[in-house]
């Protein structure tokens, strides 16, 4: 059992036995029914990527390719335009959150990255002084929230720190989420931001170090309880998945492509589970 599998089962068990019920946190499921969930607050995990600890479960298949493409949409294309996500990357699941008939998700995620020129600023800060303690990406933009409708960002903050160990330089990252749908998106979000961490590290020719993951509200929706029990019954496969970025050290952040990532030694338990998403 990998560290990610152990943490996944522990979190599911904790939510199912110790969690409390939300009161109208989200309006409806895709099918139209009232969406309620059981949740715990303050979930934290630490993974040492340099030692092969990656935050991806083997208890069910995780669509890592689509997840990584979403990161490129946000941090390279820096747009909220759904046609870019659909046509360039073939990712459709954000269409459920289109605002009106604008073809966008509102001024969120990539639009905020572009508005504040966040990536260029982070790269410049790390180039000018790798040891600075101000490498923060925040997508929590009150002005944007007031000006447009749209889902507020879940994975809204990342922070980066550099460590020198002997002759090696490591880039550590911390992801903070206000809310996370445990069974559907926990490992999707974690692996997305590991990919972003790897892109920044490659830009400078550094190694990836530790990945810290904090979720304020970790929940399982009430129409997922059967799937939760199924995941608890499953035994993980005997594999040790890891994400590899196949580009030379020093490759410019904006020259990296989704196909440069490879998830190796990943043999998850099947069949896949299906979920009715909360909208």
Image (cartoon, rainbow, N blue to C red):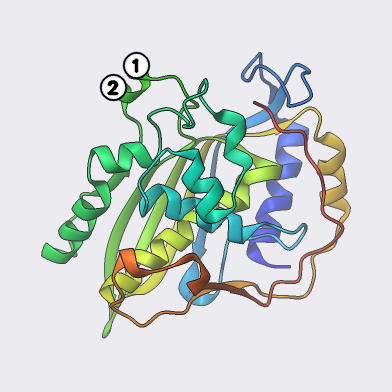
Q: CA distance from mark 2 to mark 1?
A: 5 Å
Q: Label 2 crowding class (10 Å Cα cut-off): few <14, some 14-19, many 20+?
A: few
- Residue 250 shows which numbered tag? none
Where residue 23 sits, quadrant-wise, is: top right
Q: Quadrant of the C terminus?
A: top right
Q: Quickly name the residue at label 1.
A: 146
- Please say whether residue 259 is visible from this viewpoint: yes
Query: Where does residue 205 sit, x and y in percent of width and height?
Result: 29, 78
* Residue at 63% over, 60% down: 56
Q: Please state, as top left, top right, bottom left or bottom right, where the N terminus lies in the image.
A: bottom right
The relative height of residue 80 versus residue 49 in the rendered view (above or below) is: above
Who's the residue at 45% across and 33% down the image? Answer: 153
Q: Is residue 28 left or right of residue 104?
A: right
Kindly indicate the quadrant of the structure image that contains residue 270: bottom right
For disc 1, the neighbor class at 10 Å (few under 14, some 14 to 19, many from 20) is few
* Residue located farthest toward the left when viewing the structure as drawn: 128
Q: Nearer the viewer, residue 274 or 210?
A: 274
Does residue 26 appear left or right of residue 85 in this picture? right
Residue 127, given in percent of the width and then of the height, sits at 16, 65
Secondary structure beneath dot 2 equals helix
Mark carried by residue 143: 2
SS at badge 1: helix
Q: Are marks 2 and 1 in contact (CB under 8 Å)?
A: yes
How far across and how far down the image is residue 119, in percent? 27, 52
Q: Residue 91 placed where, x, y %? A: 59, 49
Residue under the point 36% across and 55% down: 76
* Residue 45 visible in the displayed image: no
Quarter of the image holding residue 13? top right
Question: What residue lies at 71% left-to-right and 26% top-to-bottom?
Answer: 37
């Amino acid at each position: 059992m990998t560290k990610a599998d152990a943490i996944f089962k522990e979190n599911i068990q904790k939510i199912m036995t110790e969690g409390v019920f939300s009161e109208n946190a989200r309006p409806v499921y895709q099918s139209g029914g009232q969406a309620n969930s059981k949740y715990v607050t303050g979930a934290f995990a630490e993974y040492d990527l340099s030692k092969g600890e990656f935050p991806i479960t083997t208890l069910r298949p995780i669509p890592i390719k689509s997840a990584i493409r979403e990161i490129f949409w946000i941090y390279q294309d820096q747009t909220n335009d759904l046609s870019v996500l659909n046509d360039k990357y073939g990712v459709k699941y954000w269409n459920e959150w289109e605002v009106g008939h604008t073809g966008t998700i509102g001024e969120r995620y990539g639009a905020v990255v572009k508005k504040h020129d966040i990536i260029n600023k982070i790269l410049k800060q790390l180039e000018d002084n790798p040891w600075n303690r101000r490498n923060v990406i925040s997508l929590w933009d009150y002005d944007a929230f007031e000006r447009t409708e749209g889902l507020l960002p879940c994975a809204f903050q990342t922070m980066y720190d550099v460590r020198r160990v002997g002759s090696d330089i490591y880039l550590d990252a911390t992801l903070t989420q206000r809310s996370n749908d445990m069974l559907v998106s926990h490992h999707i979000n974690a692996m997305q931001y590991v990919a972003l961490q790897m892109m920044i590290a490659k830009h400078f020719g550094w190694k990836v170090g530790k990945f810290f993951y904090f979720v304020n509200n970790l929940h399982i929706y009430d129409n997922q309880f059967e799937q939760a029990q199924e995941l608890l019954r499953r035994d993980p496969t005997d594999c040790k998945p890891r994400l590899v970025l196949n580009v030379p050290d020093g490759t410019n952040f904006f020259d990296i492509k989704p196909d440069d990532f490879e998830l190796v030694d990943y043999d998850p338990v099947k069949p896949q589970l299906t979920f009715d998403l909360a909208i």
